[in-house]
Image (cartoon, rainbow, N blue to C red):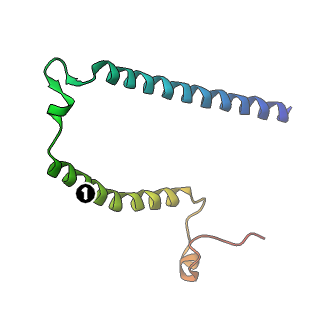
Amino acid sequence: MPGHRAAVRHRGLRLFLTARIAATLAVTAVIWGWAVAEYPYVLQPHLTISAAAATDSVLVAVLVSMAAGAVLLVPSLVWLYLIFQRTELPTEQDVAAGTGGARASG
């Protein structure tokens, strides 16, 4: 019964996805619960969030450097993802033709 096997496999994948989502929600709830329980302290009993905050110039420098890093990193990760999603590597003929490994089916 090939159809039965496919249905069982599909159900198993659905249950696996449900378990992953439930685990993600559980971890998120634990982290948020911890943060709410500690508020307004970062480290009990002396360091509060406002005392631990950096100055505005430091925050601006961090945001600018993170934006610059994202500009460099995100295109590289997209390119890496696209390379590894190909089913076949381009041949010399594909490169010469400028198709990059995409061939017409037929």
Residue 20 falls in image quadrant: top right
Q: Taking 57 as reference, is 86 above or below it?
A: below
- Amino acid of disc 1: Val
Q: Which residue is mark 1?
A: 64
Residue 32 falls in image quadrant: top left
- Which quadrant holds the C terminus? bottom right
Q: Residue at x 32, y 18 (%)?
A: 37
Q: Is residue 5 toward the left or the right of residue 37 in the image?
A: right
Query: Residue 24, image x and y in percent?
Result: 49, 29
Secondary structure of residue under mark 1: helix
Q: Residue at x 63, y 70 (%)?
A: 102
Query: Residue 67, image x and y in percent?
Result: 30, 57
Q: Taking 32 as reference, is 92 above or below it?
A: below
- Which quadrant holds the N terminus? top right
Q: Is residue 78 toward the left or the right of residue 86 in the image?
A: left
Q: Residues within 10 Å of mark 1 (few under 14, many from 20)?
A: few
Query: Residue 59, image x and y in percent?
Result: 20, 48
Residue 22 falls in image quadrant: top right
Query: Residue 15, image x and y in percent?
Result: 65, 27
- Which residue extends farthest right? 1
- Please state the total of marks drawn on the protein image: 1
Q: Taking 87 as reference, is 23 above or below it?
A: above
Q: Residue at x 72, y 29 (%)?
A: 11
Q: Residue at x 42, y 56 (%)?
A: 77
